[in-house]
Structure formats: structure tokens, C-alpha cells
Image: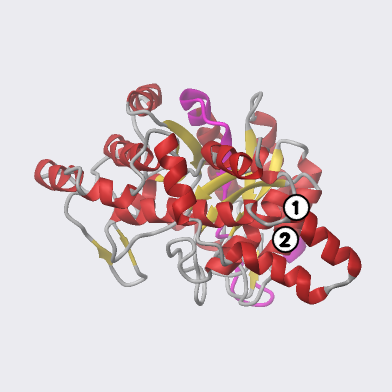
């Protein structure tokens, strides 16, 4: 197989998981902005997600968020997804919206609140069983705003206790993916603020626990590709939440703010074997002012473009330049791949896969947007907290 054929073959296997919440209404701290034709329930979210997969061929799974996507029959929801050509992906928990969680959830000083939070996580594992989902994704808004507000070490003990109970509930082939975030909403001390804390807990829990890297959850200037390389080296990179940030956790379209960073991350994924392992490539985005489905299609395409460039890095030439200490040549090899226009290559990949070479144009001409605007009248649109 030629080098180009190998790159094409790898790209044809790539899968990017889309988030159910990205199809609903979202906004800023101040307002949630409604759009016409937005899904009114999880079934309609899956209908929209199926359109993204139809035109990209690279988005076969959809992450759910509980309770936003709670239904009476999860088997029926999974069947609906299958009928539409997609599957249920990660189950995301929510321990940050109830009033009880004002001082934390699994780290809360009150055992009653901790019990409520852990019971919700166990409910999410039940939903995994019913939908055939592999991954339980955990993000906690737990933390403190003031020095002395709570015992920092005790909160870590509570976190470890709660995670251990949920870990023991996981079934065969299921995983726990622990996400970190260095601030917000806790401004003094966040209980899972960095990859090291998440890694420490996952290491103690066992092989079913792995770390999620959200590309928006870092301080400015953080070398995210170093984190990715290290977690891959340790076998503890479970997945990504892809998005873009300018200032904080902006949840913008992946590749929008710094496409070069996305390329560097994907190179470490390719170099570290993460592209052919169980690393989950998930989007975590909120489309506030742009149309939902086209934005998600664009995000999938951005990940594909960064991956294609990463696959085109001449690793033999790069290794040679690195071994020789040729700093300029090593950097040039990397930049040559990044500066390659891979769009013609990806158009070929899509055509060879029986897809339209231009996913966005194909979607815009298919009539789906007009159809859902006309049909989805009445009821309550899905969105934050819906």
C-alpha cells in the first residue's frame, strides 16, 4: 500500500462523536437563543445527528446528556438511533444544575447530597446498559470559592469514594472517562482542575478509568499536545472533547480559534497510536449564533483536515532531523505537513466512500433545514436544562 493510500485508508476509519446538546438551543450566561426547527426531544436530536453522519460519513455515534436526554424507554431510543444509521455514544452525567449542588456534588460536605449525586451516576450506568453505550463521561463542577470554605483534602477523599462506587458498577466493556477543568464555576479551588488530578484518580481506580481532554479546559498557553502525548504514553487517554477557545471554556467550533493547535494535538495522537486505539473523538460545542447542523458538519470536517495533515507528516524525515539536532529542518518537516492543502485529498476520500465531496453544500441543498422548520412546530424546544 502506498503512503497516500495508507493515509486515505486511515481517514476512512475516522469517527467523530457528536453531542446531542449541540443540536438544541444554547447561548451565553445571559440568554439562551432559540432557532427555528430545533429538536424538541432526544429522538429529533438523533434525526439531526443522522444527517451529519449521512453527509460526512464520519459521525456514527451521538453522545447523550442526562437528564437533558432522559426518556421513558432507552431501548426504544437506541433502536431509533440504529434505524437512522447511528448509535448511542457516551452517556454524560449532570451533577451541576440542581440547587442541592451549590456546594458541590460528589465532593459536597453533606453525605445526603453526595448520595444523590452518586445515585445519578449509577442511573447513567443503567442507561449505558439499556443503550449499549461504552463510555460514562464525568465532569464535576465541584470546588470552592473561598479559602477555608471546605477541607481540600477531604473533598478529594469524597471524590475518590464516589468514583470508586461507580467504577465498581461498570460492566464488561464499559469505561469511565473523567474530565478536568481548571476553573469555573469554582474560582478558588476546583476539585478536578487538571490532567494530573484526573490521572491520579483514574490510575487508582483501574484500567476502566481514563482521562478526557477537553481542548477548551486549559489556561492560555497550555501545551495540550504534551498532555495528550503523556496520557497516551501511560495508556490513560480515554478521549477528547473537541472545541475551540479564545479566553475560557468558549465551546466554539473545533479548529476555529487555533487550527495549528488542533493539528499538533492530532499529530501526537497519530504518533502515539491513539488514532488506531479506543480513544474517543467527541465534540463538545454549543452553537449559539450559527446554524446547528452546518456548524457540526464543519467541525467534523475540521477534525478530518487536522487528522489528514497529521497523517501526512514525514515521520522518517522528522525523526532524522530530530536525531541530528537539526532544529530548523525538524520544524520545517512539521510545517510542510501543516501547510498542505488536504481538502482535495478529503474530497477524494469522500467520493471513494460514496459520499458527496462537499458535505456542507450537499446538506444545504437536501432540504432538511426547511423540512424541520416546517414540521417542528409546537412543543418545547430542546436546550440547556430542557
The image shows residue 227, relative to residue 95, as above or below, that is: below
Residue 97 in sight from this viewpoint: no
| Region in magenta | 127-153
**Residue 250 shows which numbered tag?**
none
- How far across and how far down the image is residue 283, in percent? 48, 51
Task: Identify which residue, 254 or 19, lies in the foreground.
Answer: 254
Which quadrant of the structure image shows residue 256? bottom left
107 to the left or right of 341 = right
> Callout 2: helix, strand or loop?
helix
* Residue identified by numbered label 1: 231
Q: Residue furthest front?
A: 2
- How far across and how far down the image is residue 257, in percent? 48, 71
- How far across and how far down the image is residue 160, in percent? 73, 48
Task: Identify which residue, 55 or 87, lies in the foreground.
Answer: 55
Residue at the (45%, 63%) spot, across then down = 251
State yes or no: residue 211 in magenta.
no
Answer few, some or many: residues within 10 Å of disc 1's Cα (few below 14, many 20 plus, some between 14 and 19). many
284 to the left or right of 183 = left
How many badges with numbers are in the image?
Answer: 2
Residue at the (28%, 66%) spot, across then down = 289
- How far across and how far down the image is residue 226, in percent? 74, 63
Answer few, some or many: residues within 10 Å of disc 2's Cα (few below 14, many 20 plus, some between 14 and 19). some
* Residue identified by numbered label 2: 227
Say if mark 2 contacts mark 1, CB within 8 Å: yes
> Callout 1: helix, strand or loop?
helix
Query: What quarter of the picture does the N terminus occupy?
Result: top right
The image shows residue 237, relative to residue 99, as above or below, that is: above
345 to the left or right of 373 = right
Amino acid at each position: 500500500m502506498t503512503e497516500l493510500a495508507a493515509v486515505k485508508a486511515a481517514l476512512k476509519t475516522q469517527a467523530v462523536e457528536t453531542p446531542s446538546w449541540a443540536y438544541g438551543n444554547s447561548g451565553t450566561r445571559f440568554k439562551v437563543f432559540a432557532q427555528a426547527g430545533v429538536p424538541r426531544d432526544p429522538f429529533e436530536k438523533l434525526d439531526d445527528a443522522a444527517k451529519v453522519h449521512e453527509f460526512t460519513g464520519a459521525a456514527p455515534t451521538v453522545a447523550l446528556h442526562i437528564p437533558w436526554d432522559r426518556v421513558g424507554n432507552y431501548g426504544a431510543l437506541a433502536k431509533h438511533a440504529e434505524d437512522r444509521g447511528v448509535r448511542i455514544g457516551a452517556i454524560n452525567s449532570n451533577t451541576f444544575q440542581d440547587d442541592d449542588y451549590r456546594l458541590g456534588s460528589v465532593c459536597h460536605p453533606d453525605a445526603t447530597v453526595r448520595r444523590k449525586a452518586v445515585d445519578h451516576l449509577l442511573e447513567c450506568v443503567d442507561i449505558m446498559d439499556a443503550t449499549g453505550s461504552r463510555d460514562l463521561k464525568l465532569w464535576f463542577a465541584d470546588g470552592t470559592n473561598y479559602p477555608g470554605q471546605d477541607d481540600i483534602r477531604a473533598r478529594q477523599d469524597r471524590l475518590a469514594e464516589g468514583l470508586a462506587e461507580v467504577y465498581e458498577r461498570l460492566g464488561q466493556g464499559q469505561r469511565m472517562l473523567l474530565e478536568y477543568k481548571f476553573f469555573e464555576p469554582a474560582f478558588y479551588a476546583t476539585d478536578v482542575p487538571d490532567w494530573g488530578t484526573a490521572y491520579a484518580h483514574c490510575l487508582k481506580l483501574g484500567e476502566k478509568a481514563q482521562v478526557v481532554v477537553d481542548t477548551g479546559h486549559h489556561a492560555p498557553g497550555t501545551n495540550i499536545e504534551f498532555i495528550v502525548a503523556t496520557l497516551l504514553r501511560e495508556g490513560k487517554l480515554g478521549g477528547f472533547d473537541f472545541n475551540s477557545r479564545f479566553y475560557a471554556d468558549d465551546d466554539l467550533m473545533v479548529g476555529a480559534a487555533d487550527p495549528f493547535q488542533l493539528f499538533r494535538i492530532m499529530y501526537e495522537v497519530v504518533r502515539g497510536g491513539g488514532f488506531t486505539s479506543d480513544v474517543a473523538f467527541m465534540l463538545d460545542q454549543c452553537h449559539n449564533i450559527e446554524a446547528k447542523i452546518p456548524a457540526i458538519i464543519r467541525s467534523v470536517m475540521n477534525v478530518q483536515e487536522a487528522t489528514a495533515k497529521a497523517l501526512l507528516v514525514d515521520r522518517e524525515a522528522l525523526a532524522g532531523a530530530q536525531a541530528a539536532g537539526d532544529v530548523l529542518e525538524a520544524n520545517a518537516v512539521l510545517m510542510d505537513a501543516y501547510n498542505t492543502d488536504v481538502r482535495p485529498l478529503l474530497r477524494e476520500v469522500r467520493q471513494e466512500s460514496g459520499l458527496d465531496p462537499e458535505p456542507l453544500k450537499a446538506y444545504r441543498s437536501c432540504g432538511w433545514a426547511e423540512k424541520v422548520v416546517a414540521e417542528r412546530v409546537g412543543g418545547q424546544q430542546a436546550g440547556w436544562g430542557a
